[in-house]
Amino acid sequence: MTSALLVIEHEPSCPPGWLGEWWTEDAQPLDVRRPSAGDVLPDSLGEHSGIVVLGGAMGADDDALHPWLTTTKALLREAAATGTPALGVCLGHQLAAVALGGRVGRNPAGQQIGVLPVGWTDDAATDPLLGPLSTTPARGVHWNDDVVLTAPEGTVVLAVATGGELQAARFAPTVWGVQWHPEAGVEVIGPWAEEDRDRASQRGIDVDAYVRQVDEARAEQRRTWRPLATGFAALLRDRVSS
């Protein structure tokens, strides 16, 4: 029997999306916890095969406003210590970095927004999770103000954006983070654009053009990032069977 994958959803506007769909297709049970709605996070990962931490509008150090972030970071540290597969997406990527000793803050170059190239590094080719994806050029949906400014000691950098920002990393042998959103199509991005429309317009960003770009890239994004879900599910199965 396959143990459930713990999925931490910080906000209703940041759901598992396509990742949840793909894991369900792979017969991977999900235990989605929504702490902002009152769900309690487990004290440990003993009953779960792995952990996925999704995105959100809060900052990685906003524990005082969102107390469950402290528990989330503790669970990510446990994953690193016990060899439990963990994947952070956008905010989750940043939380993993902070949990393991890194530093996160506003991107000095400004907000990352768009369907942007993923800058695979040479180390990505041999990565257990992202290696099979890194052999071909890829793009990812980005929408973030913060980035990892200082990676934890021992981090293996797997992708770097054109501006030099950390895009993907293996923070520990079984803990990965991606700054882009492999789970998000226009049905997820569209509401973000509406919520951020005024602020984005003040920065000269055409949010409607961005939403169209995401919509036009739908087939490409699903084709590109489906193997990420498959590969992570395989790591979970390997852990459960070992």
Image (spheres, rainbow, N blue to C red):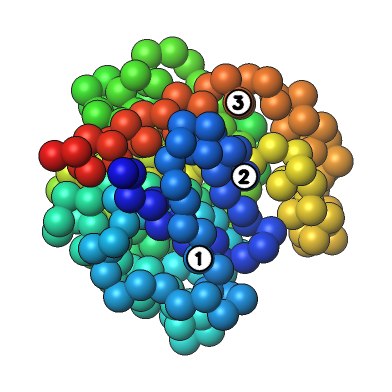
Residue topped by disc 1: 33
Q: Give the amino acid at mark 1.
A: Arg
Mark 1 and mark 3 lie on one chain; the one further toward the N terminus is 1
- Residue density around tag 2, few if under 14, some if 14–19, many if 20 or more, within 10 Å: some
Please indicate, yes or no, whether residue 149 appears anywhere in the rendered image. Answer: no
> Cα distance, mark 3 to mark 2?
11 Å
Q: Give the amino acid at mark 3.
A: Arg
Please identify the quadrant where the N terminus is shown: top left
Please state which of the two labelled residues, at mark 1 or mark 3, is closer to the viewer.
Answer: 1
* Residue under the image location 23 percent in, 57 percent down: 79
Name the residue nearer the viewer: 4 or 162.
Answer: 4
Please indicate, yes or no, whether residue 8 appears anywhere in the rendered image. Answer: yes
Mark 1 and mark 2 lie on one chain; the one further toward the N terminus is 2
Name the residue nearer the viewer: 170 or 222.
Answer: 222
Name the residue nearer the viewer: 54 or 50.
Answer: 50
Residue topped by disc 3: 222
Disc 3, disc 2: CB below 8 Å? Answer: no
The percent position of residue 62, horizontal first and vertical second, equals 48, 77
Q: Is residue 214 positioned above or below 54 on the image?
A: above
Disc 1, disc 2: CB below 8 Å? Answer: no
Q: Is residue 18 positioned above or below 190 on the image?
A: above
Mark 3 and mark 2 lie on one chain; the one further toward the N terminus is 2
The percent position of residue 57, horizontal first and vertical second, equals 61, 64
Q: Is residue 82 positioned above or below 207 on the image?
A: below
- Residue density around tag 3, few if under 14, some if 14–19, many if 20 or more, within 10 Å: some
Q: How many marks?
A: 3
Indicate which disc residue 17 carries.
Answer: 2
Question: On the picture, is 117 further left or further right than 97?
Answer: right
* Residue under the image location 67 percent in, 63 percent down: 12
